[in-house]
Each structure stands twice: as structure tokens, then as C-alpha cells.
Image (tube, grey):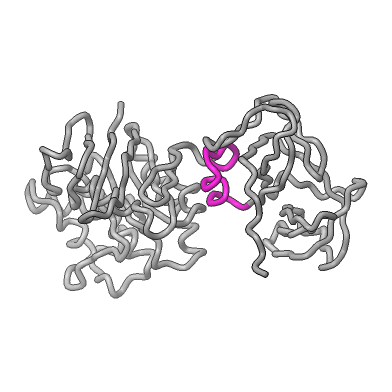
Amino acid sequence: MSQLLLESVRIAYGSTQVVRDLGLVLESGRIGCLLGPSGCGKTTVLRAIAGFERLGAGRIELNGKVVSSVREHCAPERRRVGMVFQDFALFPHLSVADNVGFGLTTGSRAARRERAAEMLAVVGLSDHGNRFPHQLSGGQQQRVALARALAPDPELLLLDEPFSSLDVELRSRLAGELRDILKSRGITAMLVTHDQQEAFTIADEIGVMQGGDLLQWDSAYNLYHRPASRFVADFVGQGVFLPGRLRGSNEVELELGVLRTAQPVIGDDAGVSSADNQQVDVLLRPDDVVHDDTAALRAEVTGKAFRGAEFLYTLKLASGHRVLSLVPSHHNHAIGERIGIRLDADHVIAFRHLQPAATPA
């Protein structure tokens, strides 16, 4: 059953359209994410779901009930939506327990205190109820904000860049913990972030946005391996576009060799046909280019980034084109060294060839 539905949603500020004809469905118990660069409209969509923005067209449904349309607008406090903000928005003069219980308006005082204690236990802060926000670390404050949002038992939880003020290592750890908490309690949630690793860690479905448009609503796997547009391919994960030519619908010839796939070569809506010899740009991910000392094909190491278990190498081909390759870190090659490589790609994604920009005279 769909917990959240957006259909043909448009939002404008004056004459400026910031969200255009956006539609998505989030099933009960699933975690969704809107992912995109700053200014793409993702936070505006989240605010519209919460009831803080009015629609210019379309509708939003929560649990089968219309809460936003051109004619209807349910007030934020009546939507049963919890929200975790970027800055946590904790009350500095209230204890942790009182912060968590602030939104509880029904039941006895004892029942509200019991519920606050229950939520603090859920986020692993049972012994922090008598402390104040300034006595907590950033990660602990984020957990308190989550406990407060969960305390009223919302039908939908919204999270607006919840880890943006935390350091990278803490963000990664808390992202996994957040998913575990939401999944263990069957909570439907929608996250907004510009960090794709955060999105991959937490969400079941991810929507990539650009300039107010939702380009693809899909699993992380499909966004990475089956991007619907060149922007999605370029924005999600790392990769390069290498020129090639189609040889029918299931093969493409590259400088690195011929790629064959059991499925037809997938292109964007700009028009990639199966015609032989059509020039295309092929998306290659770092895991598509394999280091192989026995391979006849050689490439020059022009860049390397140590990642612990792996190196991410930038490799220059004979033509001057560059590709990326993930290589186990015991293969420590020097800049300028030539190493053997081969293609090993299961998904072949081709896009209409773009001519390189002309170099000014």
C-alpha cells in the first residue's frame, strides 16, 4: 500500500518554477530519498510533503488521503508527519527527555514521560534523559532529534539533510544506524540529501533531481548500472564516457575492445538506435576496467587515490582518453607506469555522442 503519493506536483516562487510535474510513490515501510545538487528543488518537495509549501498544480496523498492540491491544503500539524531538520532544532533550555516529549500532547504526564524514555531507548540514549543538548555530541543530538520526531508515532518521517553538520566518519556510521532503526520499526521515511553514499546506505528507492525535475526514481543498483539519462549516469557514482560505435543492438566497439551484453544497449531519450556503426558515448564505471598483468592492452597511470583496500587509478589510453579503475591496494603502481587492463562490464549503457567543445583560437 502506498504511504506517500505525489502526482504531477508543481511548485513555483512567483514566475519561477522550482518543481515541475514531479510524481513518485513510496510504499508503506519503505525509505525513499531525493538526491541532487544544491538548488535542484529536493528540499522544496520535502517541505511541500510536510505542508510548509503550497502546490501550484498536482496533488500529494498520505495514506490514501489528499493533503495537498490546488484546492486543498491540510495544515502541517494535522498531517501526522515527523520531521528531522538539518540543525536538529533542539530546545537548549529543555532536558533531553523533555525535548523528546515536547510534541506529545495527549495522554497523562506519566505516559508522555514513558513514551519519551521508550524513544530514547530506541536511539540508544536511555541514560541521557536528564542531560541538556549542549552536553551532547553532534551525533547524540541527531539521535535526540530523531527520537523527538518518532515520539508522536508519525505516519511518515521526513529528514532534511540530517547529517550535514557531522563529520564524514560519523555520518557514515549514523546513516547505517538510522536505517536499522527505521526498518526495525517499519517506519516509512523520506530523506533529502546531496550525498549519494548517504542515499545508498539508507534508502530503498532514490530519486535523482535536476533543475526541478525528477529524472529517475529507482533503486541504487539501477541508478548506478541502468541510469535513464546522461545526467543520472554522470551524477551517480564515478565513471567516464568513452566514445564507441554500435555493432547491432547488443554490441559496442571501444578502444578497449568489444563489449557484448545479453540485453540491448540502453540509451537515453536523446536517441540511441541499434543501427550499426552509430557513434555513441559509453559509460564505464571503475569496476568495469580490470587490472590484468597478462593483458595485451596497456594504459598509463596518471592519477591514483588510496582508499585502504583499493586504489582508484586514473589511466590514460593510447588515444589520450582516460578511464578509471578500482584495483586492490597491494597493486601499488607509480604515476607514469604502464599497466595491463581489460574490460569486464555486465551492463552496457550508451548515450548519444557529444562532440567535444571547440577549443578557442
Image position of 314 with respect to 122: above or below: below
Quadrant where the image shows the N terminus = top left
The image shows residue 81 at horizontal and vertical percentages of 21, 45
* Residue 88 seen anywhere in this rendered image of the structure: yes
Dividing the picture into quadrants, the one containing residue 203 is top left
Decide if residue 278 is on the left or right side of residue 95: right
Residue 216: percent from left, percent from top: 45, 39
Query: At x 68% / y 45%, what residue is drawn?
Result: 284
Taking 304 as reference, is 64 above or below it? Answer: above
Q: Would you say 168 lies left or right of 296 here?
A: left
Q: Residue at x 35, y 36 (%)?
A: 24
Residue 223 vs residue 116: left or right? right
The quadrant in which the C terminus is found is bottom right
Q: Relative to residue 230, is residue 175 depicted above or below? A: below
Q: Nearer the viewer, residue 220 or 347?
A: 347
Count every numbered label the image shows and give the total: 0
Q: Tell me the residue at 37%/36% (across/down).
A: 30
Rendered image quadrant of residue 113: bottom left
Q: Is residue 222 visible?
A: no
Task: Please state the horizontal and vertical placement of residue 9, each as a whole percent of the image.
Answer: 27, 40
As for residue 236 lying within the magenta part, the answer is: yes
Q: Is residue 251 left or right of residue 114?
A: right
In the image, residue 224 lies in the stretch drawn in magenta: yes
Return the x and y of residue 254 as percentages of the image width and height: 78, 41
| As drawn, 42 above or below 306 | above
Q: Which residues are magenta?
A: 223-238
Residue 150 or residue 190, whichever sits in front: 190
Quadrant of residue 39 within the rendered picture: bottom left
At 88% from the left edge and 53% from the top edge, which residue is drawn?
Answer: 298
Foreground pick, 267 / 95: 267
Give the residue at the far bottom of this rendering. 134
